Amino acid sequence: MLSLVFGTALALEPAAHPVTLVGGTSVSYGTPDSMGVGSDGRLLVRVGQAQVDVAAREGWAFPDSRLVGALFFGGRWSWASGVFVRAGFAHNHEVPAEVVAADPFASVLGAADGIRHRSGLAVGSGWVSQPLGDDFTNGRVRLGLDLEVSAFPDDNGPVLYTGGAGQVHLALGSAD
């Protein structure tokens, strides 16, 4: 079944430009009772009909007050309708508020003492619009919505995170 779904996805043309930069604002929920808000950036590089998907997110989780830096590396498969699915490796840097206050720069970089490093898997799906405004943007700007579930099989924080992001996509490079 999966080979049928992914085989169909790979047969359809993704965005015509080889590189896309994505920026967005995200909201997440970590089980059992953690909420978070943040911003994220993503780099998509077309490889044949698929895309390499690399992302970074920085946000603040509450009520336990911690900085969460999230990294993602995986693959993305897109359909002509703008719908996509993605899967890959997830890594979080979860930093308690007192560590952030003591060393904010190292905390953001993921190098401060007291960081909880967590690794797991993430899957996501979403939708990207057709290009907006051919005159001003030359058809390189799109809007998107991304939904994700990440799983971290340890006891250093929430086991599951779910979330979503509203995004702006900027296509780079010449179209084929």
Image (cartoon, rainbow, N blue to C red):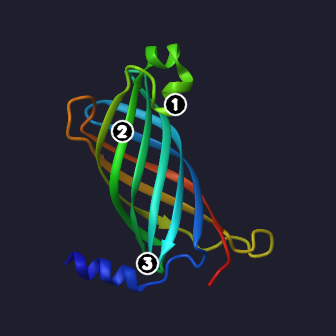
Please tell me which residue lies in front, 99 or 13.
Answer: 99
Residue flagged by tag 1: what amino acid is it?
Val
Between label 3 and label 2, give the one nearer the viewer: 3
Query: Dot 3 surroundings within 10 Å: few (below 14), some, or many (20 or more)?
Result: many
Quadrant including the C terminus:
bottom right
Residue sitting at x 33%, y 33%: 117
Distance of label 1 from label 2 (alpha carbons): 20 Å
Relative vertical location of residue 47 with respect to residue 113 in this rendering, above or below: below
Image location (x, y in percent) of residue 110: 45, 32
* Rendered view: 34 above or below 143: above
Percent position of residue 57, x then y: 49, 43
* Residue type marked 3: Trp
**Pointer 1 residue:** 108
Image quadrant assignment for residue 159: top left
State left or right for residue 4 relative to residue 127: left
> Would you say 82 lies left or right of 86 here?
right
Residue indicated by mark 3: 79
Q: Earlier in the sequence, mark 3 or mark 2?
A: 2
Distance Cα–Cα, label 3 vs label 1: 35 Å
At 52% from the left and 67% from the top, the residue drawn is 45
Which residue carries the number 2 mark? 29
Q: Amino acid at mark 2?
A: Tyr
Residue at x-position 56% and y-position 69%: 129
Q: Secondary structure at mark 3?
A: loop
